[in-house]
Image (tube, rainbow, N blue to C red):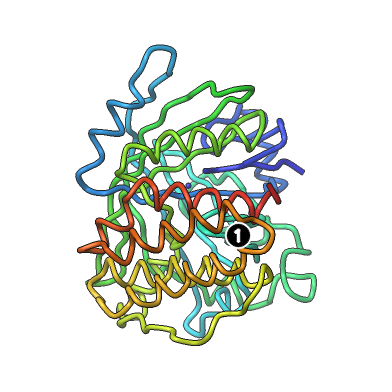
Amino acid sequence: MAKCVEIHSTDKEITRKFDVTPQSRQLNHKKAVMEQEIELKFIIAPRGVETLRQRLNTPGVRHIPAAQLLNIYYETDDSWLRRHDMGLRIRGRGGEYEMTLKTAGRVVGGLHQRPEYNIALDNAELALEKLPADVWPGGSLPEDLAARVKPLFSTDFDREKWLVDEGESRIEIALDLGEVRAGEHREPIGELELELLEGRVEDVLALAGELIATGVLRQGSLSKAARGYHLAKGNPPREINSAPLVSGEAGLEAALAHWQYHEELWLRGNKKAKAEVVKAVNAIREALADKHEMAAEQMAQVGAVIDAAASADEAAFNPQVARARLMLTAFLVTGR
């Protein structure tokens, strides 16, 4: 099993999308490649694209010019795939196509971990029969599924990349700029993803910490697909969740998710969501107080910064806030 880390990663053997040999491409037609996708995704402030380019275009870093990626996501009328926590897409670049099925996984703070199956295609047409039978509920492809799935939304963006050596690791950084489209609804894409090609996750987190210092990045828990599914529903308003948070370390992950969800609402103009962000940060501080006094103090400072912020943008892209959230994500994922 190949395993990859994207931070928006991995054992050393990875099957690269659109960068495979003819022999492996022929093999992929017969057999799906399963990878464990782990992504740490950052959202870029619109003002920050050139800042990041200047930071990344340094000696010793290999730059790969932007290339257009078109992704079409599929679903049934009754949302069969979503109900089974699956995502299905075809990606095209430079006349090459790949079908990807993502299955149930875990998201912590913006670190996405989901098994995915990839198959190279001759054209932009689904071939569900090429996926392993055991990926489907019941152990076989549902008889009528291929006839029922249809395009639901698309993502169209340019991806620019840099290859960086950090510590003991080789890391790929991808800058994605474009938009998600579903019918008449559209939403911009401005993301930075770091992928560990080989080495240690700790090096990826260290590099992420350096990039956060630019003040133009925030962790994002909503994937391109999640935003597309929301647009496909007609882009309804996202509601505030004022439910009490679970106390203690057991509730840290839920509190972090609560923080990020309501930060997203706040950034989208819902000023009432700020109180829920502060509530989540305070819950994290209380959960850390007994065993992690220094981390709890950092969270107290973060809560004060957010509470005093004049806008969601000022709070979300504050380097102190972003660094504390990255450290919490690392703690939840690695235990350190």
Q: Describe residue 88's horizontal placement relative to residue 3 as left or right.
A: left
Q: Identify the residue at horizontal 36%, vertical 67% (top origin).
A: 263
- Numbered circles on residues, count: 1
From what the image shows, is residue 121 above or below residue 65? below
As helix, strand or loop, the secondary structure at mark 1 comes to: strand
Q: Quadrant of residue 241?
A: bottom left
From what the image shows, is residue 32 above or below residue 72? above
User: Disc 1 marks which residue?
Assistant: 102
Question: How far from the left and from the top, in percent, is residue 187?
Answer: 27, 62
| Depth check, front residue: 217 or 248 | 248
Q: Identify the residue at horizontal 64%, vertical 56% (top origin).
A: 292
Q: Describe residue 228's horizontal placement relative to residue 32 as left or right.
A: left
Q: Identify the residue at horizontal 65%, vertical 63% (top origin).
A: 105
Question: How far from the left and from the top, in percent, is residue 48?
Answer: 25, 41
Q: Describe residue 21's horizontal placement relative to residue 313 as left or right.
A: right
From what the image shows, is residue 12 above or below residue 300? above
Q: Residue furthest top?
A: 59
Question: How far from the left and from the top, in percent, is residue 18?
Answer: 51, 36
Specify few, some or many for label 1: CA neighbours under 10 Å numbering under 14, 14-19, or 20 or more.
many
Mark 1 residue type: Lys
Question: How far from the left and from the top, in percent, is residue 191?
Answer: 36, 47
Q: Quadrant of residue 63?
A: top left
| Depth check, front residue: 100 or 305 | 305
From what the image shows, is residue 279 above or below residue 192? below
Instruction: Say which quadrant the N terminus sits in.
Output: top right
